[in-house]
Amino acid sequence: ILGCLIIHLLLGYVFCWGTISPYVGAYFEKEYGLSMNKEFYIHVGGLNTLLFFGMAVGFSFAEKAVNLFGMRAVSFACFLAFSAMLSLSGLGVNILIDILLMTLLPGLCIGIIYQIPFYCAVQYFPKNINFLRIFFYLANGLGGFIIANIYPIILSKTTAATPEPGAH
């Protein structure tokens, strides 16, 4: 149960695109020389849609993947794939590849991993499933709250300053 709570605590980052969209926009401006304006920063926040689309696809594959490979193997594979995608996303090879590596493909892994705690709860604690769901959802929301407040601190220390739309 603790592992399931930690998974959902970490997956709360999904709700932080509004917090990091100015930094993503500044990255695209710096890496690809795109001319940024206020409207572009609004559209960067819209990349969250691709992340949630990937999650929806991942939700539909989660049960099949778990039944074929088991919970541990699927969790480990998604962790490795997710880490690799986020590590490769900053290479600046192509803007479309960066967008896919930052949104759609991690969303797929998140969608699969998101379901695993519920499968564990059903398998090991079938009488307490509704009670455990509450804790998983709370952990997910708490994760978003914590990470949304930590991201600006971490990112402002790794960049020269907080980016402003059209400031470059």
Image (cartoon, rainbow, N blue to C red):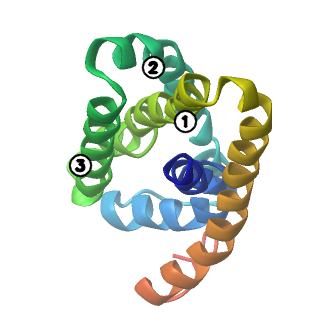
Do the residues bearing badges 1 and 3 touch, measured as CB atoms within 8 Å? no
Which residue is disc 2 drawn over? Answer: 62
Q: Nearer the viewer, residue 44 or 154?
A: 154
Left or right, 136 with reference to 62: right
Residue 147 placement: quadrant: bottom right
Q: Residue at x 59, y 51 (%)?
A: 5
Few, some or many residues within 10 Å of mark 3 (<14, 14–19, 20+): few
* The label number, if any, that marks residue 84 in the structure image: 3
Secondary structure of the residue carrying tag 2 is: helix
Image position of 99 (left or right of 24): left
135, 141: nearer the viewer: 135
* Residue that badge 1 annotates: 117
- Residue 61 in the image: state x and y as whole percent: 43, 14
Q: How far apart are marks 1 and 3 (CA)?
A: 23 Å
Of the image marks 3 and 2, the number of the one nearer the N terminus: 2
Mark number displayed over residue 149: none
Indicate which disc, 1 or 3, sits on the residue closer to the N terminus. 3
Give the class, few, some or many, for how many residues have Cα within 10 Å of label 2's Cα (few <14, many ≥20): many
Give the amino acid type for the residue marked by disc 1 in the picture: Pro
Q: How many marks?
A: 3
**How many neighbours does mark 1 have within 10 angstroms: few (below 14), some (14-19), or many (20 or more)?**
many
Expressed as whole percent of the image width and height from the top left, the position of residue 115 reads 54, 28
Could you tell me the amino acid type at mark 2?
Ala
* Element assignment for label 3: helix
Residue appearing at x 38%, y 19% in the figure: 66
The amino acid pointed to by label 3 is Ala
Residue 88 percent across, percent down from the top left: 23, 52
Callout 1 secondary element? helix
The residue drawn where x is 32% and y is 52% is 86
The answer to whether the residue labelled 2 contacts the one labelled 1, judged by CB atoms less than 8 Å apart, is: no
Q: Is residue 134 left or right of residue 48?
A: right
